Amino acid sequence: MSAVAEHMDVLPGPFVHPALFYRDEREYLEGTVPFVREGLAAGEAVAVAVPGERLRLVRDALGADADTVRLLDMREAGRNPGRIIPGVLRAFADTRAAGRRVRIVGEPVWAGRSAAEYPACVQHEALINAAFRGRAVTILCPYDAVRLPAYVLTDAYATHPTVIPGGPRPRSYDPDAAVARYNEPLPPVGDAMTFPFAAESLPTARYAASDEGRRLGLTGVTLDDLALATAELTTNSVLHGGGSGCCGCGPRTVMCCARCATGAG
């Protein structure tokens, strides 16, 4: 029986979201491989989305069983932490047959994640609890207890109902507080060209951003990406925010920021 299975009977609800603290490759494999094999034996749909070097360890340890598991390199599939829930976890879980339980090994945090990426990783882990609440899904999240800083492990306690080794629902479990703690406003664009936008002027905003990007030397696909990012940002601000806002393009990296009229970023 895997360490996860030992805790599943005491966790409420069909959704199970434990963190696995490991110190070396042996503990990593002892925590993940039995978890995967138990899922396969139970007829569950199983996926493993972890950094490439860990993915190779799991694949080799599974042997022929690896052919029945969806294997994803999280360094590629989860490069943008904000895309992991829709693009990795739900992309797998939502396509399984109704009534079939799903289990996933997902490792979104690893040594080397940038300071800019990490807050989104914490929010991702916290929001998993809402995104899969009530669903027959188990998501096991490994954490390198040796290479990751102590504050990362503290955040893992806040975003996971149970931690292995450990037990169910640590007192520090508070995913809403974790989201709020890292929900900081974007830094100011700085020396940037800014322009207002509203529903009727969305094309104008896209053209203005493209013109500024072209002036700053962007061409080809990069310029197209800027236009697409501006269109997505301004359109979502109109649809889900206050209906209008202000967009800015910075001079060095050319970035877009929008602030809804209601004040939400």
Image: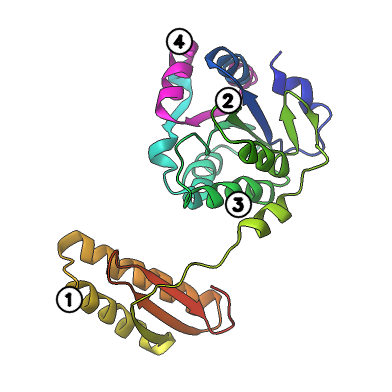
Q: Looking at the picture, does residue 136 appear above or below residue 181?
A: above
Neighbours of disc 2 within 10 Å: few (<14), some (14-19), many (20+): few
**Tag 3: amino acid:** Gln
**Badges 2 and 3: C-beta atoms under 8 Å apart?**
no
Camera-side mark, 4 or 1? 1
Which residue occupies 72% across, 31% down? 163
Q: Nearer the viewer, residue 21 or 62?
A: 21
- Where is mark 3, residue-wise? 123
Q: Position of residue 70 (x, y in %)?
A: 46, 29
Q: Which mark is residue 63?
A: 4
Which residue occupies 39% across, 79% down? 247
Neighbours of disc 4 within 10 Å: few (<14), some (14-19), many (20+): few
Q: Which mark is residue 146?
A: 2
Q: CA distance from mark 2 to mark 3?
A: 22 Å
Residue 145 falls in which quadrant of the image?
Answer: top right
**Badges 2 and 4: C-beta atoms under 8 Å apart?**
no
Q: Looking at the picture, does residue 44 appear above or below residue 59?
A: below
**Tag 4: amino acid:** Gly
Disc 1 or 2, which lies upstream in sequence?
Answer: 2
What's drawn in magenta, residue-wise? 36-65
Disc 2 or 3, which lies upstream in sequence?
Answer: 3
The quadrant of the rendering that contains the N terminus is top right
* Secondary structure mainly formed by the magenta segment: helix
Q: How many marks?
A: 4
Residue 204 belongs to magenta span: no
Q: CA distance from mark 4 to mark 1?
A: 54 Å
- Where is mark 1, residue-wise? 215
Q: Which mark is residue 247?
A: none
**Tag 2: amino acid:** Val
**Badges 3 and 4: C-beta atoms under 8 Å apart?**
no
